Amino acid sequence: MAGRAPVATISRTLARARFAVVAARFNEDISRQLLDGALRAFAAHGVGGGAVDVHWVPGSFELPQAALLLARGGRYAGIVCVGVVIKGETPHFEYVAGVAAQGISRAALDTGVPMGFGVITALNEAQAWARAGGAVGNRGADAALATLHMAGWMRGIRGPDRRVRRRRR
């Protein structure tokens, strides 16, 4: 994703909806910037701080498991996952980034709860900061906007009071 996410109107069907942000503590200074961006995006679209719960996990590898657990609880209209994976000298980067992306996508598909992918995968720390509120934007804010759009769209399709419930596996 290059540049900033497009700005659009968020559905009014989300007036009383609750959201969660799951943030990875690894590279915490950058993750906090992503979290702040997500919270600002929610607030700018009428979702106040009292309607957004923040959950911290150790790293990006743990984001999918936390998001899945929260989604299965049926409390949230959407979940945003934020974290940072910076390439080092070993292939560890590819494994963690891949697990995070695939796991978050799988959790969303399995539960029907929209999930925003605000995990930065960068070659170096400077690239990560540029995507955490720097010259390239804030991927946490972008993920929150995507989550809001999908939650509104899905509520419009299903109706405001219907939730997808799937059996636990």
Image (tube, rainbow, N blue to C red):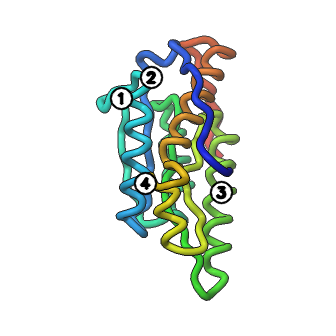
N-term-proximal mark, 2 vs 4: 2
| Separation of marks 2 and 4 at Cα, in angstroms | 20 Å
Query: For numbered disc 2, what is the local secondary structure?
Result: loop
168 relative to 33, above or below: above
N-term-proximal mark, 1 vs 3: 1
Q: Residues within 10 Å of mark 4 (few under 14, many from 20)?
A: many
Q: Residue furthest front?
A: 135
Residue type of the residue flagged with mark 4:
Ala
| Separation of marks 2 and 3 at Cα, in angstroms | 25 Å
| Residue of label 2 | 17
In which quarter of the view is residue 154 placed?
top right
Which label was assigned to residue 51? 1
| Residue of label 3 | 101
Query: For numbered disc 3, what is the local secondary structure?
Result: helix
N-term-proximal mark, 4 vs 3: 4
Residue in the image at 44% along x and 24% along y: 45
Residue in the image at 49% along x and 59% along y: 83
Residue in the image at 59% along x and 43% along y: 4
